[in-house]
Image (cartoon, rainbow, N blue to C red):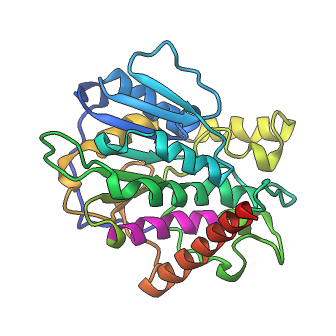
Amino acid sequence: MKRNKNITWNAIAANKLDLKGRNVTVVGGTGGLGRAFSRLMALRGANVTVVGQTFRDKDIKGISFIKADLSLLSEAERVSNLLPAETLDLLVLTTGIMAAPKRQETSEGLERDMAVSFLNRLVLLREIAPRLGNDRLNAKSKPRVFIMGFPGSNQSASIDDLNSERTYKTMVAHMNTVIGNEALVLDSVKRYPHINFYGLNPGLIKTNIRSNTLGKDSIKFRIIESLVGLLSQSPETYAERVVPLLFTPEIEGHNGAMFNRKAIAIHPSTTMTNDYVGAFIKASEELVNRVKTNRLK
């Protein structure tokens, strides 16, 4: 990842943020990095809606919950109709797993990592972007969408086999979702000019994201996550670094910017040409349309 020296911002301490009156949704906000973001923003006064499987923060004022299984695109569509999109200042997309050792398929016929870590985000954005932030009062900036992934990785994907139906390799399947999320940022910049889009690369952080690959509660999983915890920042530390970025006015003119684990701007992957982004999004939309067509049969 190469630092983008053309984009800088002056960070303030997270505990000095005043987020009263800000309306935020965190998809994937019930665990891992999304939960750390949600808790911090609510504690600083924001009205936060979290989407996920299990709600653990009933004790924190300012957080509301929408239960959803985002391995299903039908659930992403349902959630989009429940979200207060018109009044949102900020949408953060954090849902993610890592691909399993053997291919897993959802009831909609999608490779599970592709469905959870990328396609549900694409579907949700398509549904709510046209109305995102339309009814905000006295807004001084565009509504913002932050998409978490691994931008700047300079990887390429199997565009002709995004659903891993011909061949399956764990890391290839996961990198398809990584590349998809970076492409989604860059495509959305052009598709929705009334919204600012940004990419987040948190790097290696101790969460449950690797449990699907290593085996939940397995000895291997526990050892690796213990090492990750010793060598990297915690979700809470990452949130303290990045949440001020989510609201700073200094990035308003940098639509499409990407940021690393320290909230420093980085360049997009060199593979992300306009043609490549367009081809990736087209192939993704074909997968989504296949699911919708099968649903009608």
User: Do we see residue 33 in this rendering?
Assistant: yes
Q: Main secondary structure of the magenta part?
A: helix
Q: Where does the C terminus fall, quadrant-wise?
A: bottom right
Most extreme residue toward the top, as rendered? 59
Specify the quadrant of the image occupied by residue 294: bottom right
Specify the quadrant of the image occupied by residue 208: top right
Q: Is residue 96 left or right of residue 4?
A: right
Taking the spot 35% from the left edge, 39% from the top edge, the residue there is: 243
- 64 or 78: nearer the eye? 78
Most extreme residue toward the bottom, as rendered? 275
Which span is picked out in magenta? 176-189
- 291 or 213: nearer the eye? 291
Q: Is residue 219 left or right of residue 196?
A: right
Taking the spot 75% from the left edge, 58% from the top edge, the residue there is: 108
186 inside magenta stretch: yes
Image location of residue 30, percent across then percent down = 56, 31
Number of residue marks: 0
Image location of residue 286, percent across then percent down = 62, 75
112 inside magenta stretch: no
Image location of residue 71, percent across then percent down = 68, 49
In the depicted structure, whether residue 269 falls above or below residue 43: below
Q: Is residue 135 left or right of residue 224?
A: left
User: Do we see residue 234 in this rendering?
Assistant: no
Image location of residue 53, percent across then percent down = 64, 33
Taking the spot 79% from the left edge, 40% from the top edge, the residue there is: 221
Q: Is residue 127 left or right of residue 111?
A: left
In the depicted structure, whether residue 297 falls above or below residue 242: below
Most extreme residue toward the front, as rendered? 297
